[in-house]
Image (cartoon, rainbow, N blue to C red):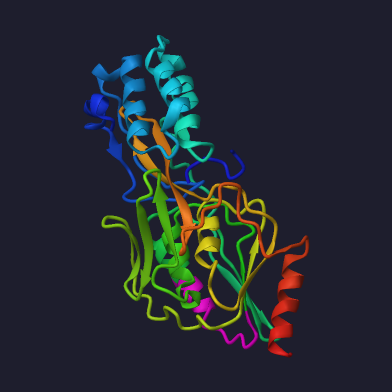
Amino acid sequence: MGTVEARRTEASDLASSMDTAVKVSVGLTLALIVVTVTACTPSPDRDNSQERITEAIALMDDGGLFATGDDWKTARAKALASDVPANKVSNVIREALLVAGGPHSALLFPGEFGTSVERREPEATVVDGIGVLALPSIAAIGGDQVTSYVATGTAALEAPAECGWVLDLRENYGGNMYPMFAAIAALLDVDQPMKFIDRNGVETPVEVTADGVSSGDDSGLEFPLDRFRAIADSPLAVLTSDRTGSSGEAVAIALTGRPGTRSFGETTHGFATGNEVYQLLDGSTLLLTEAWTATRDGTIFPDGITPDTITQQPLDEAQAWLRDRCNP
C-alpha cells in the first residue's frame, strides 16, 4: 500500500463525524502498500483540531480491532480531551490509533497515500520437474497492472511441474490480496480458503471461484479464473520470511490446511490482519485494522505465521522435500 513502508512498522455519539468521511476501500484490504487515490481537499470549515480528532476516533470506535476494554476507553478519552494546535493533531490520532488498531494501522499525511511503488509481477521457473513461483506485492486495485499480474501468475502455473510447486512469499510485503489469490487460483483446493474475523467474532470468508475473488458483499476482484483448482492436488511448498507481511501472510494462511502442502523459512512479520482505508476530511488517510486474518478453521496469528520447517535455506529444503515426494 502507498508509502506505508514494508518494514514499518461509528460510535453513536460520534456518528455525525463519520457521515462525511470517505471510505476508499470496499471490504477488507490487507496492505502495507496502498494505491493511488486523489486526496480530499480540506473544507474551510474543517480546520478545527478537535473536530478532526473526533472524526478519526469515531472510525476507530466503530471498527478498530482492539477498540474495546479499559485501554481503549483511556486512550479514547485522552484523545477527545486533547486541546492541541493543528500541527499536533496527527500525533494525537496516531497515539489513539496504536491502541485501537495496533501496529498494522497507520495515519498518512495528505498526498502520502498513493506514492508509487516498484511494479513487479509473478515470476516462475521450472527445473527438473519442480516449479518455483515468486509472488510479489501488488499495490494496484484495478487496471492493467492487476490484469497483467493475474494473467502472468495464471500462465506461469500452466507450466508442467511434475514434482510440484514452490510458492515464494519471502518478498511479499502486502498490498491488494485479491490479485494474489487470483494469480494462484489453480493451486487452491477450496472455494473459501481463509476468512476475516472482526472483534465481535463475525466471520467474513474470502471466496475464490471461476468468476474471481470476493470478500463480503461489496469487495473483491471480478476476473475469469478458468483454471481454479486445476493443480489443487499438486504438492506445494510455501516459502516465508520475516518480510512476508499483511496480504503476503493472507496467502500463506489460505494455503494452511491444503493437502500436500508444507511451509519453509522464517516466522512472518506479524501483520496477519485486515485493514480498511478511509480518506479523512483534512486529506489524510487512515488505515485502520479491523479484523484478524484466519485460516479456514478459524485460527489466527497474532505473532506471525511459523512455518512447518524453520530454516535459513528454505528454497533448497523445499526443493529437496518435493524431490523426495516425487521420487520415493
Residue 63 as seen in the image, left or right of residue 148: left
Residue 261 as seen in the image, left or right of residue 281: right
User: Is residue 109 among the parts visible in the rendering?
Assistant: no
Residue 4 belongs to the span the image colors magenta: no
Picture coordinates of residue 56 (x, y %)? 36, 28
Residue 94 as seen in the image, left or right of residue 50: right
The residue at 59%/69% (across/down) is 123
The residue at 51%/57% (across/down) is 299
Magenta residues (range) = 151-164
The quadrant of the image that shows the C terminus is: bottom right
Residue 191: name its quadrant: bottom left
Figure label count: 0
Picture coordinates of residue 144 (x, y %)? 39, 62
The residue at 47%/43% (across/down) is 2
Residue 162 belongs to the span the image colors magenta: yes
Picture coordinates of residue 307 (x, y %)? 66, 61
Above or below, 267 against 287 in this view is below
4 or 165, nearer to the observer: 165
Residue 45 as seen in the image, left or right of residue 262: left
158 or 12, nearer to the observer: 12
The residue at 32%/22% (across/down) is 54
Above or below, 259 against 289 in this view is below
Above or below, 304 against 45 in this view is below
Residue 227: name its quadrant: bottom left
Picture coordinates of residue 87 (x, y %)? 45, 15
User: Is residue 217 among the parts visible in the rendering?
Assistant: yes
